Image: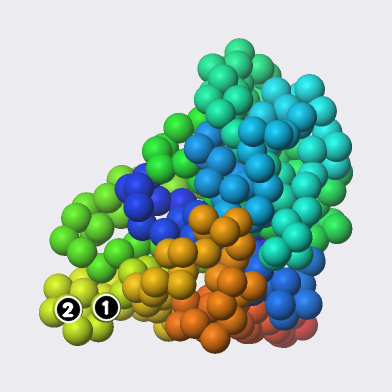
Amino acid sequence: MTRIYAVANQKGGVGKTTTCVNLAASLVATKKRVLLVDLDPQGNATMGSGVDKSELELTVYDVLTRRADARECLQTSESGQFKLLPANGDLTAAEVEMLSLDGKERLLWDGLQPIKDEFDYIIIDCPPSLNMLTVNALTACDGVIIPMQCEYYALEGLSALMNTIGRIQELLNPNLKIEGLLRTMYDPRNSLTNDVSAQLSQHFGDRLYRTCIPRNVRLAEAPSYGQPVLSYDRQSKGAIAYLALAGEIIRRNENDEKAAAHAAHS
């Protein structure tokens, strides 16, 4: 069964793209088949996966505007060993074009259907705003992973995202849920970090991942080499943290499946 996760937070600079690229590579390291979908016109996930966004003939833009099917647009990240539906600046135009298309909220969902079953995990990197691209990601996914820094304004931004998720559950995707909250750029020596972390734990309980992603130089350097940190420096704290996150996500899914099977039998 394919799991589709949107990695979203309308606040920029919280580690969304870093999480997408490194989670994709870490899931591959556990022998999962992974597709990363870059839905951000900046194309950072594409570049961070080692694919040159300026050389692309076809991108996710062509899928969303129904000019090409997803299979024609797929690239392979050599450094991360996952498949990539890439993006570049063309995606900015898609925003406007999508508004005039029928079923505009479901264009990504429709585009993924023919290839979905070839993957265990599909990870979608959302832009840092709650626009039509993000709506498409939230309509196409099973769950949202929310990366956030433990800082004062983080909680404010979270409430806007929660409202959006609520609206999309009502109108477009009743099965949408918050898969988990991920603490990024984590520094346990900082007292504010610990305060915000405690608030998140209190509010979200077991939806808060136990894994925290530390501030890590190697993690910050890896994208400029077009590599996930796992291939750039496997021993680094960043690489170890994302492997731990992949393990935590897989275990959660296995537990959910067992619980669902148990409920079906009882």
Image quarter for residue 60? top right
Judged from the image, the secondary structure of the residue bearing numbered disc 2 is: loop
Residue at coordinates 66% horizontally, 17% vertically from top-left? 101
Residue furthest left in the image? 191
Residue 75 relative to residue 180: left or right: right
Give the labeled residue for mark 1.
187
The answer to which of 150 and 44 lies nearer the viewer is 44
- Identify the image quadrant of the C terminus: bottom right
Q: Can residue 177 be seen in this view?
A: no
Residue at coordinates 46% horizontally, 64% vertically from top-left? 221
Give the labeled residue for mark 2.
190
Task: Classify 10 Å Cα crowding around label 1: few (below 14), some (14-19), many (20 and above).
Answer: some
Image quarter for residue 123? bottom right
Name the kind of residue labelled 1 in the image: Asp
Q: Label 1, label 2: how many angstroms apart (C-alpha)?
A: 6 Å
Residue 36 relative to residue 75: left or right: left
Residue 193 image position (x, y, % from top left): 21, 74
Residue 86 lies, with reference to residue 57, above or below; the image says below
Residue 137 lies, with reference to residue 151, above or below; the image says above
Task: Classify 10 Å Cα crowding around label 2: few (below 14), some (14-19), many (20 and above).
Answer: few
Residue at coordinates 24% horizontally, 59% vertically from top-left? 155
CB under 8 Å between discs 1 and 2: yes
Residue 130 lies, with reference to residue 77, above or below; the image says above
